[in-house]
Image (tube, rainbow, N blue to C red):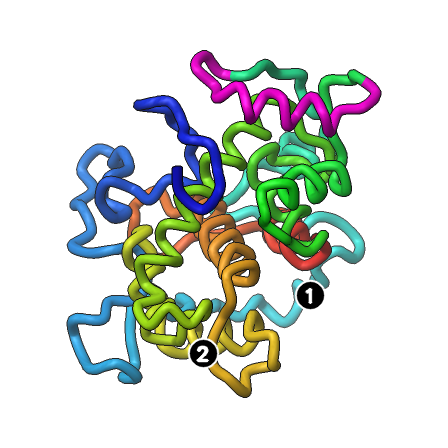
Amino acid sequence: MSGGYPQHPPGYGYGYGAPPAQPYTAAPYTAGAPPPPQPYGAPYASGPYGAPSAPYSAPPVEKPPKDKHQAYGVGGAPPVHGGSYPPAGGYASPFAALVPSAFPPGTDPNVVACFQLADQDGSGFIDDKELQRALSSYNQSFSLRTVHLLMYLFTNTNTRKIGPKEFTAVFYSLQNWRAIFEKFDRDRSGKIDVNELREALLSQGFSVSPVVLDLLVTKFDKTGGKNKAIEYDNFIECCLTVKGLTEKFKEKDTMYSGNATFTYEAFMLTVLPFLIA
């Protein structure tokens, strides 16, 4: 048992929480596409920390003809480009109803009991505040924003309800993230700094640039960036944000090149759930 969480059954697969067996190259490849040589995002081997990096620069943007002005979101849908999201009519709503689920075989009885205790009306779902209280029963205190991100990433909806299957995945994933945090919190300060965060993200297969790392630390440092360090609860929110946005991006990066094309509507529906959590 680690970090106060029940032990998950051997071989249990739960997606978002488990650090990948290898970096982004573990994903299936499009026929003919060469595998990327290192974790997804900006490479570090090409230069010292703090040096400019690639390939995470935006592709050149072609200027539209002057006689064809069109504002995104105003007077019709944005232009559709190859490799982008489906048309607006086929794009899944973030407020889609959550499908009822059951506990996976072999789920720890303590996890089942914890969910049932939180599900006071016996509906088979618990809401955000009930999930927050359930997690606190295992000495894990998270803000409602972090809870909302957990619920969004494990249900792919913003309905802010979660079922037994997703609840189980949340518990086992938090166990893994706790282990990652403790591994890179080498001085046992209860915080990780910029370099430790970089290594923690790399261990999960995400290589972000120094500029992005600085933004992440400033955002999730409770002192507003003065200490340049992140505590465990904010580390979870940071990982949820990086992993969630990267997974959404990867869905459209079919050639695993670090570039993707989005329609305006798809971009908004991808990013906004992370901003309004």
Q: Residues within 10 Å of mark 1 (few under 14, many from 20)?
A: few
Residue 54 in magenta stretch: no
Residue 98 place in picture, x, y as percent: 69, 25
Residue plotted at (41% across, 78% down) = 211
Q: Which residue is mark 2?
A: 214
Task: Residue type at mark 1: give it.
Answer: His
Residue 166 place in picture, x, y as percent: 57, 28
Q: Is residue 258 above or below residue 45?
A: above
What range of the chain is rendered magenta?
104-121
Q: Quadrant of residue 218?
A: bottom right
- Frontmost of labels 2 and 1 is 2
Q: Quadrant of residue 121?
A: top right
Q: Is residue 71 left or right of residue 32?
A: right
Measure how far apart labels 2 and 1 are at the Cα level. Answer: 37 Å
Q: Nearer the viewer, residue 129 or 56?
A: 129
Q: Which residue is mark 1?
A: 69
